[in-house]
Amino acid sequence: MLRVIFHLDMDAFYASVEQRDNPELRGKPVIVGSPPTQRGVVCAASYEARKFGVRSAMPSMTAGRLCPEGIFVRPRMEDYRVESGQIMRIVADTGALIEQTSIDEAYLDLSKVIAASTHPAESVTADDVLFRAVPVGRQLKNRICAERGLTASIGIASNKLLAKLASDFQKPNGLTLVPDRDKVAFLRPLPVRSIHGIGKVTEQVLNQAGIRTVGDLQDCPEDLRALVGSWGPKLKQFARGEDDRPIEAGDEVKSISSEETFLDDTEDRKLLRKCLHEQAEDISRRLRRRHLGAHTVQIKVRYSDFTTLTRQVTLEEPVIAAAELYRLGCYLLGRDRLVHRPLRLIGLGVSGLTESVERQLLLF
């Protein structure tokens, strides 16, 4: 069966919900997160704020300096989750097989839906099938806009790699089709970092070898094992726009955490920071191993009397780096002054897991 894959990506989701619900915020630089006068982080930013360099997970104080006119709004996570559920119900009406990768993103496999509208005796090419999916994508976008008052960008292609890149191509409110006949040309000018699985380390290795664009990868006569180890052949396939990853309707890994129970209760800041840093390193390694990023970071503490508290922060863009996880853990501890007496246990965890563009460089 010829494959038809959509990637749906809501545009600046948290900030767009705020602008929809408060007309006074429309067209203005909205920053969802703690105000710059307090210790906090940016959970999301509208496109108007992104023009100033504001991004998710950035300290609110930094965002305030970059965007002095920014309007800071406290996040309403429960409202965003409810909104996500409403949108996914609309998506489900398409009859697609759905892999929701985050609160505002999902892959849709519409292969059977489009095939059902094709006469068995009709001879069609892969691109014919993809072009027939365009009205479905347009109807889905229009319905989300009409019923939820929000815009979405959709990429349409024969696989997940191309559909994801296509959804980013004309944001916001974009609809981009990448026919199979054009996939190599579509990929050629893109930076190597665009390819799924290439993180900062791999990008640096490839750049040092003179490989800066996907076109350079396509033209490379070698299989790239000398640069990226056993992942080389798969990387070459991605560079040609070939991707056989299936749509996974279920996700076994829902969260990742690391905890430490102390022999003696402690409030030694140096010891707690060291422990938190090790936990962040451990979680980051496990995320990279599974090629995941996390939208929610949670801190957990337990006191001498076994009272247990948890606090969390949810971001629009996923985090994976140990330094970011550690910083967010410290922020949560400080924000709610959780270390006001000795701790019996401290733990760091992540959830809201989604596919990551980071991949650890494989070495011989």
Image: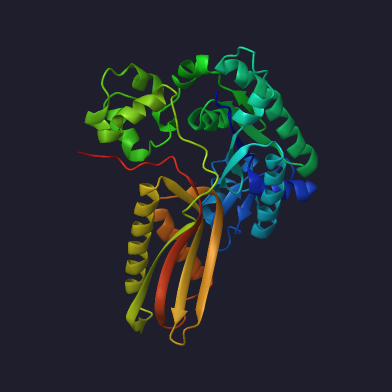
Q: Quadrant of residue 136?
A: top right
Q: Quadrant of the N terminus?
A: top right
Nearest to the observer: residue 268 or residue 285: 285
Q: Residue furthest top?
A: 123
Q: How many marks?
A: 0
Nearest to the observer: residue 277 or residue 99: 99
> On screen, 193 above or below 72?
above
Residue lying at 36% horizontally and 76% vertically, measured from the top left? 261
Q: Is residue 134 visible?
A: yes
> On screen, 218 above or below 345?
above
> On screen, 303 above or below 296?
below
Q: Quadrant of the C terminus?
A: top left
Left or right? Give the position of 271 relative to 174. left
Left or right? Give the position of 292 relative to 118. left
* Residue 171 horizontal/vertical position (percent): 62, 32
Nearest to the observer: residue 22 or residue 243: 243
* Residue 297 horizontal/vertical position (percent): 49, 59
* Residue 289 horizontal/vertical position (percent): 35, 48
Residue lying at 43% horizontally and 25% vertically, measured from the top left? 242
Residue lying at 54% horizontally and 41% vertically, measured from the top left? 53
> On screen, 165 above or below 255?
above
Nearest to the observer: residue 342 or residue 235: 235
Q: Residue furthest front?
A: 121
Q: How is the image coloured?
A: rainbow
Q: Is residue 39 visible?
A: no
Q: Quadrant of residue 11?
A: top right
* Residue 214 horizontal/vertical position (percent): 40, 23
Q: Residue furthest left?
A: 364
